[in-house]
Amino acid sequence: MTTKILYFILIFLISAFICRNSYSQIENVPLNNTVYDFLKEMQVKGIINGVNDDNPNISRFQVADFLNSIGMKGNELSVTEKKLLEKFTVEFVPETMNKKNTASMFHSNMNVSNGFKYILSDKQKYVLSYEKNRNNLFIEPLLNVYIANSVKPDTKKNAKIFDGGFRFRGSLFDHLGYEFRFIKGGAVGDSVLVETVFPKIKSTFKYAENIENITNYDFVGGYLKYYLSPAKGMDISAQFGREKITFGLGYSGSLALSGEAPDMDFLKLNFRYGIINYTSVFGSTVGEYSPDRDKRYSKYFTANRLKLSFDKLFDVGIGETVISSRGIELGYINPLMFYKFAEMSLQDRDNGTIFADIQTHFLKDLELQGTFFMDENILSNLSDLTKASNKTAYQLGFFWYEPAGLKNVTLKFEYTKIRPYVYTHFDIKNTYSAFGTGLGHPIGPNADQLFFNLRYNFNEKISLNLSYQKERKGQNYYDQEGNLLKNTGGDIFQAFRVGIDKEEAYFLDGVRVNNDYLRFNLRYELLKNYVFDFSYVSALQKNLTYGTENNSGYGFVKFSFKY
């Protein structure tokens, strides 16, 4: 990792001499913040441009710039959009912060209200907000409580999940953003329901280890991000640390990095100038959990992506990733390297992929996008879709804002197809996964999915989200003892076995399982920062091979302190 750290230091030194601009909010906005939905809607509507879905994490000052641009076109916004703009402006534009709209629980030297008496007010809330000489610190509480109950087939199963913590963030020296966050939680009730409602818990060490008398989990993260703009229209940033990131396009999940796996530690370099957008990531994570410490291991995720953005026309990009468990490989640290061919020059020991995508911007209110993904062998067998070595996938979809003139409504559609053996590797340690969870699209190999999503903003406080997923999958054949009888490429952790498995791998071959998921969510922000989610999920699984069916459903209420 030495090479990329040297790049970071070099950028820092150069900026001290050539950079003239200053920024007070370099730290990133977490990907679960609903401002990303609002910015996306405004881009598809044609109000703004430059919102990146392929590498979405952006600094707070960049969000503020987008919001200011939206405000300049206020006459094109609906009443609800204006209210959303006002809400997010208070949260992200420092110049709007005042005693009427913002409060600090502990005494602040900023222009805000002070005291715990505002804890139940409709103001933007901080535990502490502090600034001196353009260096600032914000402390925010983190709180989530789930109360879940099974609806079918058994109404007696229930679960409670709760966690809390703090997030420290801010910016220093006008160019360095920072964040530290820690969350500790616990769960009681039916373990299957706990994992269904909150799947991320399965990839936490304390939960997997399960040796304490209380089921518990924790999440920790933090980073430093350095940003500079040495020339007009040029943005350069280097970030080192841990937070949730995604990579590549996808409404239902990216084929390259969906963000479903645990947050990884990484060093990310971003460069933007004119039509050029370039990102390089070197990250580390862990392999599958084992009770035997000697069998635990680290693995490394490396990615590059070049995107060309043609304003009001389309974006076209090409990216690549490599999964390696052999330790730090200097060839994958170089940000200016074609990793797939570097992997071949290193004797083809790692799991490399390459993908290309396109996203349109020339149709007002309608965005089209698609991705083609190739795992391992990219030059042969592409014309023969029955070969097991043809490990390819693709996505096609659209984002339609205000369809048929329906105000404040978003309709998304996407079809995803992933051929057998995609994400697998002959070296089990190089499987495209982390801590038992796939890094790529959640449906995994030998599967396809139809995805529909409808979102409606009633106003700035209430939104409705409906989604439907139709999934088809071909699973491997196993006997009652769990022994593999026939490998059809449907398991991310079971690679093709040379000399044992058939050279032909037909799509959806194997134990045929169809899944239908219907998800309903109503979000209500009672007061600023206090959010209630009312959700219901119905799942119908049909095993067409064995003629079995499982119909289940559950509901939950989630309270969170939104940050």
Image (spheres, rainbow, N blue to C red):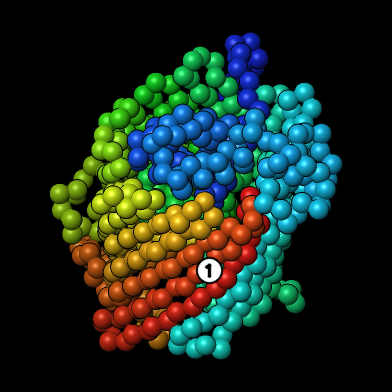
Q: Which residue: 30% across, 42% down?
A: 365
Q: In the shown orientation, is residue 12 left or right of residue 103?
A: left
Residue 337 showing in the rendered view: no
Mark 1 neighbour class, 10 Å CA radius: few under 14, some 14 to 19, many 20 or more = some
Residue 509 showing in the rendered view: yes
Q: Position of residue 286 (x, y in %)?
A: 57, 54
Mark 1 lies on residue: 534
Residue 379 vs residue 241, the one in the foreground: 241
Q: In the shown orientation, is residue 226 left or right of residue 429?
A: right
Residue 142 vs residue 108, the one in the foreground: 108
Q: Position of residue 302 (x, y in %)?
A: 48, 41
Q: Position of residue 281 (x, y in %)?
A: 50, 37
Q: Residue 96 is drawn in which quadrant? A: top right
The total number of labels drawn is 1
Q: Which residue: 49% across, 61% down?
A: 437
Q: Residue furthest left?
A: 383
Q: Amino acid at mark 1?
A: Phe
Q: Position of residue 1 (x, y in %)?
A: 59, 35
In the image, residue 534 sits, relative to residue 112, either above or below, namely below
Q: Secondary structure at mark 1?
A: strand
Q: Which residue: 73% across, 57% down?
A: 120
Residue 396 vs residue 111, the one in the foreground: 111
Q: Residue 342 is drawn in which quadrant? A: top left
In the image, residue 160 sits, relative to residue 396, either above or below, namely below
Q: Which residue: 50% across, 23% down?
A: 235
In the image, residue 48 sits, relative to residue 30, either above or below, namely above
Q: In the shown orientation, is residue 75 left or right of residue 419?
A: right
